[in-house]
Amino acid sequence: MEICSMMQNLNQMTNTEIKRYISEHRNDEEAFRAALQVLMSRSDFSTQHPYPFDLDNPESKVEALLLEKLNRTE
């Protein structure tokens, strides 16, 4: 499959389908890279939290983040 049509197909897949595709094509470097590129382009890095050990007071910051998550799900 040529790269352009592969990218178009990947763009139409859900994240779950792309993850399955990546798993099935892990030994095909071109297909793997293309799928990973599409998946990474969908990531929202603004919602990611910092690595806990990079924080000034990791215990209280992690606790606050967990409490925030718990309160959102209730």
Image: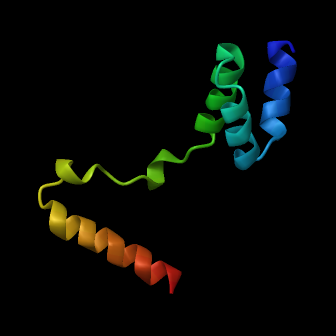
Q: Residue at x 34, y 78 (%)?
A: 67
- Residue 38 in which image quadrant: top right
| Residue 26, horizontal then vertical, whole percent | 64, 25
In the image, residue 38 sits, relative to residue 60, either above or below, namely above
Q: Can residue 38 be seen in this view?
A: no
- Residue 30 in which image quadrant: top right
Q: How many marks?
A: 0
Image quarter where the N terminus lies is top right
Q: Residue at x 65, y 19 (%)?
A: 27
32, 66: nearer the viewer: 32
Q: Residue at x 79, y 25 (%)?
A: 7
Q: Is residue 68 left or right of residue 32?
A: left
Q: Is residue 65 left or right of residue 72?
A: left
46, 54: nearer the viewer: 54
- Residue 28 in which image quadrant: top right
In the image, residue 56 sits, relative to residue 71, either above or below, namely above
